[in-house]
């Protein structure tokens, strides 16, 4: 679990908790429930973006690994072809 996923999940859960707290305050007819809901929405959005970014980084890293493996295989095949003895025609 990388740092973006950890921070994203923490932000998601804190945002959800703050929003639930705001809804509970709203049901009890307390006037300042919005002060809890504003940071709750912001933290929830930030957490969602961080989790999404974490998954995009993971896919990008996997693509780079595959690309490097392909390049390595191409270089290996090229070196093997260079080491093969060249056929010399008897006419020359």
Image: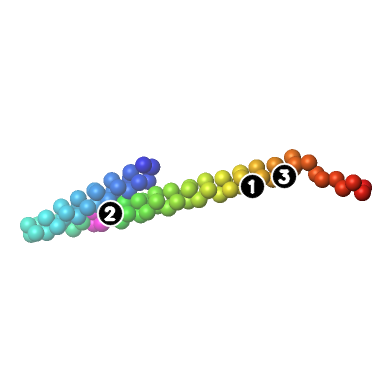
**Residue 58 - label:** none
Q: Residue at x 30, y 47 (%)?
A: 9
Seen as rendered, the residue at the extreme left is: 28
Q: Residue at x 7, y 57 (%)?
A: 28
Q: Nearer the viewer, residue 65 or 52?
A: 65
* Percent coordinates x, y for residue 5 in the rendering: 35, 46
Closer to the N terminus: mark 1 or mark 3? 1
Separation of residues labelled 2 and 3 (CA atoms): 56 Å
Residue 41 falls within the magenta-colored stretch:
yes
What are the residue bounds of the magenta stretch?
A: 38-43
Residue 55 falls within the magenta-colored stretch:
no
The residue labelled by disc 2 is 44
The residue labelled by disc 3 is 81
Closer to the N terminus: mark 2 or mark 1? 2
Local SS, label 3 = helix
Residue 76 shown left or right of residue 21 in the figure: right
| Mark 1 or mark 3, whichever is nearer to me | 3
| Mark 2 or mark 3, whichever is nearer to me | 3
* Percent coordinates x, y for residue 25 in the rendering: 11, 55
Residue 22 in the image: above or below residue 85: below
Q: Nearer the viewer, residue 80 or 66?
A: 80
**Residue 74 - label:** 1
């Amino acid at each position: 679990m990388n740092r973006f996923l950890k921070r994203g999940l923490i932000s998601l859960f804190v945002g959800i908790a703050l929003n639930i707290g705001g809804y509970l305050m709203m049901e009890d007819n307390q006037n300042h429930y919005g002060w809890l809901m504003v940071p709750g929405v912001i933290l929830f959005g930030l957490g969602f973006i961080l989790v999404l970014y974490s998954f995009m980084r993971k896919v990008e890293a996997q693509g780079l690994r595959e690309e490097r493996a392909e390049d390595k295989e191409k270089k290996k095949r090229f070196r093997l072809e260079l080491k093969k003895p060249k056929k010399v025609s008897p006419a020359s």
